[in-house]
Structure formats: structure tokens, C-alpha cells
Amino acid sequence: MVLFKNIPESQEMRIYNSNFGDYIVFVDESGDQSLNSINASYPVFVLSFCIFEKTHYYTHVVPEILRLKFDFFGSDIPILHEREIRKREGDFNILMRDEIRDKFFDRLNQIMIESQYTIVSSLIDKRKYSHFNTPDNPYSVGTKFGVEHVFFEMQEHEQRGRKILIIFESRGRNEDRTLEEEFKKMVEQSNLNGIKGMFDFHCVSKKANLPGLQLADLVARPIGVHYLHPEQHNRAWEMLLPKMRTSHDGKLEGYGLKIYPQFDPTE
């Protein structure tokens, strides 16, 4: 099959010379954004950005997730969703059986460990943030930090002037439109040299079954759980910690993790 049979040579060259970057970014959350009704057992909002080098993503990450699904569900229809996996709901009710659950998590953990990606995450402690005067939406706060530090990561990988796809999970038509407007406004008002025009913004439904979005969903909650219960053993956090963006001397907070606010306004 010749894709460019009837395309003029100049147009064909424009397609081949497209200035796509070498990376793709997927964004998903854990927790809700409400500052009025705060879940006492999980009073945080976490927004996680997962950065994949494209070649590794389509040659390793995607095939491994597809193999996992076909091996355990017989097709690639099921969507890996942290809440359903944790609660053994829907397609994941097979995890009620010990022998299947152990094998499934061994395989999933192996994928999470062996896949190459970098995490940038924002965590909003709503117990503190809700006491601010006219606080912004937690999603907006998390997005600002995440996008800026993804930009820094892309600069370090020589992506200046390249187009980087950034894909957020769709939350509904109105919410997506609002997020896109806020995203564009944030980028336009940024003082970071080179950020304007770098990101190709998209909102995509979970139903699109994108492996990258599913991995972003899986990494968000363990970060929140570790923050709330740092003394507890958290295998998922231990697996993710080496994936978190850090400074050259290994500092995590402020580089791959933003915890906000740092102080309690009621004290």
C-alpha cells in the first residue's frame, strides 16, 4: 500500500518534516477537586504527568499492556482503572480469586517497573488549601506546576522548538473547554522562554483506551497515599519513586513533586 501515491512531492515532504517532538505526555488525577465536601479518608487531589519517549512507548509499553489484557481478559477491551482494580469491580472481579490476583499484580508491577517514563506530580492538600481566600480550582493549580516542570524536563532532553503532545483525561465537554482555555492562558502568560507553542493540547476520553492514560491513572493514587501515610509500607510508591523527576543531586520536592500548600493557613 503506497500512502503517498497521489500526494505531490512537496506536500509529502511537509508531512515527513513535521516537527513532532520525541516525547508524549499523559495526565490523569486521583481524588476529586471539591473544596466544600472533603473526603476525610483521602483529602488530597493528585495530578500526575507521565512522560514517555515515543519509540519506547509504542515498542514496549503499548505491547506489554496489550499482552497483559489479552492474557487475563481475552481481549484489549478492559481499561486499566485504578479504582476498579482496587475495588475488584467490573472486568476486574476476576481479582477476587487469589491465584489470579497474584499473577495479575506481578505482571502489572513488572510493566510499571520495566517501562521507562518520568513522573511529574502535583499534590493539593485540600484540608489546608480550602482555607485560602478565593482559592483556585485544584486542577488548575496542579496543571500549572505540572506543565512548567514537564517543560523543564523537555528542555533537558533538547526538545526546544519541538511539538510535544500533552493528553489530559477528558472530564466532560464543558470541563475540557475550561481546561483548554486555562491551559492556553497559562502558557501565554508564562515567562518561561520557549514554552509558547511547545505543547499540543488534547483531552481524550478513557474510552479511547490509551495505555499512557491508564498508566497515568495508576500512578496518581499511590503518591497521595504515601503523602497521607508516609509511615506505612507502600509497594506502589516504592516502585514509582525511581520514576519521579528529581534534581541532579536527587531532590524530589519542587522537581518531580509539588506539595501545596506547604503551610496551614489556620495556624
Image (spheres, helix red, strand yellow):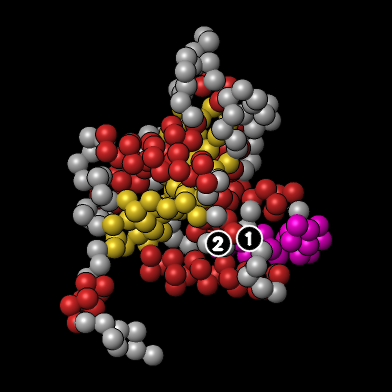
Asked whether residue 241 appears in the rendered view, the answer is no
Asked whether residue 43 appears in the rendered view, the answer is yes
Using the rendered view, name the quadrant where residue 64 is placed.
Answer: bottom right
Q: Nearer the viewer, residue 83 or 233?
A: 83
Give me the residue at 64% from left, 36% from top: 232
Q: Write down the residue under mark 1.
A: 79
Q: Write down the residue under mark 2.
A: 208
Residue 81 image point, x, y percent: 63, 53
Give me the residue at 47% from left, 21% from top: 135
Q: Nearer the viewer, residue 145 or 110?
A: 145
Q: Are marks 2 and 1 in contact (CB under 8 Å)?
A: no
Q: Quarter of the image for the N terminus: give it.
A: bottom left
Helix, strand or loop status at disc 2:
helix
Helix, strand or loop status at disc 1:
loop
Residue 169 image point, x, y percent: 52, 50
Give me the C-alpha separation between circle 2 and circle 1. Answer: 9 Å
Q: Which residues are magenta?
A: 90-111
